[in-house]
Amino acid sequence: MRRSAQATIQAARHSVLSSTLSGLALMFDGLLAVESMRSASRSRRQRVFDHVTTFWAWLDQILQRNESCAQAVTKVQAMGEEAGLSRCSSNTAAYCKARNAMPPEFLEEINAMVCGGMKRRVRGTERWNGLLLKAIDGSSVKLLDTAANQDAYPQPTSQKPGCGFPVMGVTGVLNLSHGGWDAFATVPWQRHDLFGALQLLEHFEEGDLVLADRAFNSYELVALLLLRGAHSLMRLHQKRAKKLDWRKGRRLGRNQRIVEWKKPAYRANGLVSTEQWASLPDTMSIRLVRTNIVDRSGKKIRLIVATTLLDNDTYNGGQLVELYARRWEIELRLRDVKTTLAMEEFHIRTPAMARKTLLMVMIAYNLLKSLIQAAGQDNAIALNELSFKGTLDSVLAYEPRYRGRQRHHRLRRQIFDQLLDTVADKILDIRPFRHEPRAVKRRPKPYQLLTAPRAVFREIPHKARYRKSTQS
């Protein structure tokens, strides 16, 4: 029978929603099939901005270096018109409400799909002596200056009220075997990164080796990791290094010792729960390996690493020191997130949305890393030799080629193979001895500093050189 006009519109709309209005959905169909995403959303309501459509629009925003919501809505309008549907409203309210309504569990399930696919592709040669390498580190993100953000993530105390921005502390777990982020935890900026690391214990399991700097070298974290079957390799904390007597312990060599650490006499307030504290062993055997290195300033310093890998025959001390140098990779990956994806600041008004945005950033990063993993394995190239920025540029260049290709499976396979070949061509020029000082070259404009809330601040007009203003 001839279908009614309403049935025709519904069929067209279903076709559009199945393709999620985005070439990105077809590009990453191998990891995130539309059916799996709709099953994860657990939403049966039909709307223009359902969870799946909103997800791909939001992902496009992030890949476009944190572009505006208006741009995302405009792209949805263009895709809808291309499919023969009427244009949705240009007002961003519906899209923003859809982002707010998206449950975090939906995003966590999507990230689990992506990470699961990457983990299945990890080869034995990408492990270290059979261990899966993971790294922990902390960073921070600025948020909009709203009352809700200030309550959850207060601004630094050095800034006057009304003149600063809330800062969300972030601790992440990077899987060095495939290059993707396993998880993030958020804490107020004032709290130590160790508090975030203890929230991520569930992401470590037997067969993992955790790399971290000396800020994480606490008895509590090392012991809790060991209880889960995960080993650790960290730089010795500066307080322990000052009190270290190298003559104590069991000698393994000139630069190696096995020492006994005792459980602290008291539980640090709020660091671990009472149950976790009770589960910690009274003593723990730690292997120390020392060597001399040259720091950034060109000075020779003594480096001591602490590990729970006690077998010197299986895990050579020199190899452990070389392996610890790979901890620096997490610093570079944080730079990819904050600089390359322009996620230094989140233009978000609530803490809940800030945490969801962090989840979206993690998914976007992992999807790009999945392409790097596939391209590297197909072309026998190490993962850290392929450019993250080059992969991002390739994805944005190839995304339009996927549009309207829902039924062209062979052609999509050809486009994907071409995309992987392009990613494999983006090889980094690694210069290990290049000097890159942490300094800002661009000079700021000579504006006044906001030294008081905007409601009471008085600007000095028509001054080429501003001076500190007087308040009324």
Image (tube, grey):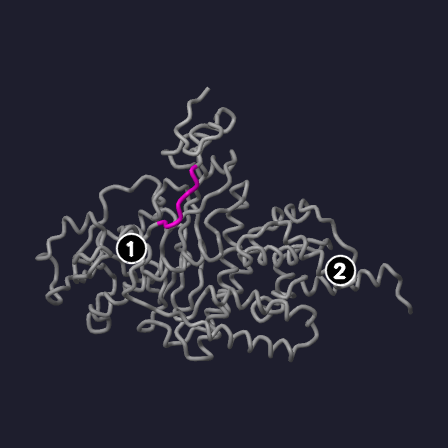
Q: Which residue is mark 1?
A: 213
Q: What residue is shown at x 35% (from left), y 67% (from top)? A: 207
Query: x and y percent of residue 144 in the render?
Result: 51, 40
Question: Identity of the amino acid at label 1?
Answer: Asp
Q: Is residue 1 left or right of residue 215?
A: right
Q: Which residue is mark 2?
A: 81
Q: Is residue 469 left or right of residue 314?
A: right
Q: Quadrant of residue 201?
A: bottom left
Query: x and y percent of residue 388 in the render?
Result: 45, 65
Query: x and y percent of residue 248 in the render?
Result: 10, 56
Question: Identity of the amino acid at label 2?
Answer: Glu
Find the residue positioned furthest to the left. 247
Between circles 2 and 1, the one closer to the viewer is 2
Find the residue positioned furthest to the right. 1
Q: Could you classify mark 2 by the number of other residues whose Cα lies within 10 Å: few (under 14), some (14-19), or many (20 or more)?
A: few
The magenta stretch is 440-446
Q: What residue is shown at x 41% (from left), y 32% (from top)? A: 466
Helix, strand or loop for disc 1 = loop
The N terminus sits in image quarter: bottom right
Q: What residue is shown at x 42% (from left), y 65% (from top)? A: 179
Query: x and y percent of residue 56 in the render?
Result: 61, 59
Is 138 within the magenta? no
Q: What residue is shown at x 50% (from left), y 37% (from top)? A: 145
Distance from the alpha carbon under mark 2 to that under mark 1 = 52 Å
Mark toward the start of the polypeptide (2 vs 1): 2
Q: Quick check: marks 2 and 1 in contact, CB under 8 Å? A: no
Q: Quadrant of residue 317?
A: bottom left
Find the residue positioned furthest to the top. 472
